[in-house]
Image: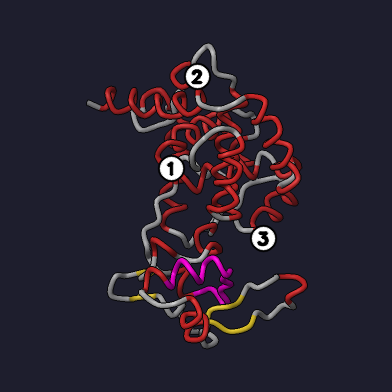
Amino acid sequence: MKEHSLHNETALPRNLAMQINAERMSAASRYMDEMISKGFEPFFCGNAAFHLLARCRRCGRCCKEERTIAVSIEDCGRIARHLGKSRKKFIAEFTRAHELSSSRVGNARMLKKAMDSPCPFYDQDLPGCSIHEVKPQVCSAALYLTKMNLLLCKENRRFSVFPNCPADIEMREQLIAWRSSPKNDPAGPQSPSQIEGPSIDMDVYLFLLRLKGMEIYYGEETASRLARMIGLPKTPGDDEIRPIARLFVQRLLMDDDAEEMLQLQP
């Protein structure tokens, strides 16, 4: 049963890759380079992979500990529709002016919340976010693909560890298991021969992982434009890209400096 599931899963990115227009991908890659410099690699793709592999446990720690939460106009519209409100009413009821000037943040705003209080959408009875499916983009990007974390990774030349996050703890335990015995773990990453077909260039898979990273970092609208540029009708779903995330992590684990760069403590 596991072998069947694994076979179906590895077929997903290959099917996606076959739909991509190679010439358009080259143009889209240059556009992506302007948005996120390649100087952030392997940390941009790596953190995108971690985002896909980590499973949020909805413990509510982020909801309770973040001092401020920024929301874009797109966030406001999406959350408002989810709540059955007009965007104007949502903005008036739940947001306030951003702390930074509009010349720096455009029309972004902040969620109203008292100092040292949780996010207004935190529900301790769930527990966690009551609008998890439509939460603000900054929340979707946390913890791995925030601007601050990318800057720290680039500066320190290693991936960050989030010791208070249950999802990060579990994922790192899995990485240690993969590094110790990758061939014996049926849930572990696939070898390149399992995911790559002879007609598929590895760059195509890396492009798809970067595209998913763009969606996490910039939002669905930006990523959808990039997807259409290369001939895809929409940005691939998380489950479609997760096998590529596993492959990317496997390549990182094979590096001689993996333990230090990934901060793995067996």
Which mark identifies residue 148?
Answer: 3
Q: Position of residue 123 (x, y in %)?
A: 34, 76
Q: Position of residue 143 (x, y in %)?
A: 54, 58
Closer mark to the observer between disc 2 and disc 1: 1
Q: Position of residue 247 (x, y in %)?
A: 50, 30
Colour option used:
secondary structure
The tag earlier along the polypeptide, 1 or 3, is: 3
Amino acid identity at mark 3: Met
Residue 210, above or below 143: above
Amino acid identity at mark 2: Glu
Which mark identifies residue 237?
Answer: 1
Q: Assign a secondary structure to mark 2.
A: loop
Q: Assign a secondary structure to mark 1.
A: loop
Amino acid identity at mark 1: Gly
Label 2 to label 3, Cα distance in Å? 33 Å
The tag earlier along the polypeptide, 2 or 1, is: 2
Q: Residue furthest left?
A: 1
Closer mark to the observer between disc 1 and disc 3: 1
Q: What residue range appears in magenta?
A: 65-80
Quarter placement of the N terminus: top left
Quick one: 224 or 174, which is closer to the camera? 224
- Whether the magenta-drawn stretch holds residue 24 is answered as no
- Whether the magenta-drawn stretch holds residue 78 is answered as yes
Residue 257, above or below 54: above
Label 2 to label 1, Cα distance in Å? 19 Å
Which mark identifies residue 196?
Answer: 2
Label 1 to label 3, Cα distance in Å? 25 Å
Crowd class of label 1 (few under 14; some 14 to 19; many from 20; radius 10 Å): few
Q: Residue furthest top?
A: 198
Q: Position of residue 50 (x, y in %)?
A: 51, 45
Crowd class of label 3 (few under 14; some 14 to 19; many from 20; radius 10 Å): few
The tally of labels here is: 3
